[in-house]
Image (tube, grey):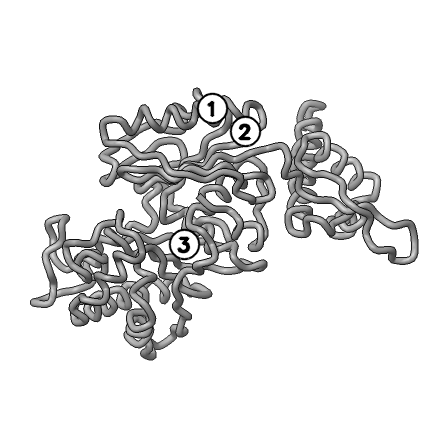
Amino acid sequence: MFTTEDALDTQAAVRRANLRRALQLVFQASGTQTRAGIARATGLTAATASSLVAELIESRLVVEGEQAESTGGKRATTLSVDAAHHRILVIVVQPTSSHVALVALDGTALEAGTVTYTPETRDRVLDDTVREVAGRVGSRLLAVGVQVPGTTDGRSVLESVQLEWHDVPLAERFEAIAGAPVLLVNDVDAEAVAEAVREEAAAGYRLFIHLGGGVGAAVTLDGELAPGPRDRAGEIGHVQVVFGEAARPCRCGRRGCLESAAALGPMLGEEFTDTLDAEATRALVARADQKLIDEGARALARAIKLISALLDPIEVVIGGPATVLGPRFLERVRAETDYAARGTAQVPIRYADPRVPPSAGAAQAALTAVLGVRWSPAQLRTVSA
């Protein structure tokens, strides 16, 4: 039997859900949304919608703007995301440096920069960075989104070969400094999140594949990550896809792994590292052996064809440094998947959208974690670190 406390808990849960719905509607149409629009979209009464908006305004999440155009009656007051108060700190951690950005609630990057370190000074520099920002922003710091190259459960870095971290409780450490919620997100997952919300309707499965020093993947469903129960989804780099004499040795000790053919090192040569900028990577592409690049495209196409047959994604997106490989590589991948496997459909394959900064994913993940809402594609494209 339900108790009075159960009823109160249920009412509170419904209230929180309605607040998220109202806030999302403002995020989707910031500057044009109204209380009446929220009532119509949610089916709530005008009084309830006004009550929700009042609470969002009091929480400094929404602000009133100008009056909307008249529809025959009293002109309604428009609602916008309050960009003047809350802040999200974004840290994109790399082996020898981190991109750092302070983002407003409307997605605008207010500050952006880079901090550098050595493996020995990394912990101290990152802690000092969080401490400095938290000291300036204070209680306005809504959340911290930390993007890391490695597997994570959102709280700890379970394993990062690049950072040489294993079971590092980074979120707990940063929360003690920042006094705000901290969310860790894998770098490939962050890229996939940013890519998935580039469109207003992010329906269906989307397969995102990152090609760089390694190979990783992420799957989103309706714009949200679809992780596995052991936080290992997307670890496809060391699945064997090349066999026989064509199989090359992989750094993992086996032969024929996807990474041994389709990572940028095997395609462009040992000079490639993830620290190279786009211009330097293009220079490697220009003088690379096209045969090796074609072999990488073929290996990647095999993985894409198999995964696509399983998921039936709306599209496959190739991101990371591989986007500088240009149209020839992309067309080669498309050609290698362009055959009739009975019962399957041909899936569109494209490069990641260059207008969406990869660091936007960590900011989006943090926003969703604390408020349960998402930026619109236009807002997301303003986030930069």
The answer to whether the residue labelled 2 contacts the one labelled 3, judged by CB atoms less than 8 Å apart, is no
Which label was assigned to residue 141? 2
- Which of pointers 2 and 3 lies earlier in the amino acid sequence? 2
* Quadrant for the N terminus in the image: top right
Q: Looking at the image, which residue is at 76% across and 34% down?
A: 54
Please identify, in this view, whether the residue under mark 2 or under mark 3 is nearer the observer: 2
Q: Looking at the image, which residue is at 36% across and 67% down?
A: 309
Mark 1 Cα shell of 10 Å, populated few (<14), some (14-19), many (≥20): many
Q: Look at mark 1 in the image and give the residue it sits on.
A: 178
* Residue 70 in picture, x, y percent from top left: 87, 55
Q: Looking at the image, which residue is at 36% across and 61% down?
A: 318
Q: What whole-number distance in Å separates the C-alpha atoms at marks 1 and 3?
A: 31 Å
* Residue 132 in picture, x, y percent from top left: 45, 24
Q: What whole-number distance in Å separates the C-alpha atoms at marks 1 and 2?
A: 8 Å
- Which of pointers 1 and 2 lies earlier in the amino acid sequence? 2
Disc tally is: 3
Q: Amino acid at mark 2?
A: Leu
Among the 4 quarters of the image, the one containing residue 246: bottom left
* Residue 186 in picture, x, y percent from top left: 36, 43
- On the rendered structure, is 310 left or right of 66? left
* Residue 335 in picture, x, y percent from top left: 31, 76
Image height check: is 355 above or below 54? below
Q: Looking at the image, which residue is at 49% across and 42% down?
A: 363
- On the rendered structure, is 306 left or right of 371? left
Q: Look at mark 3 in the image and give the residue it sits on.
A: 219
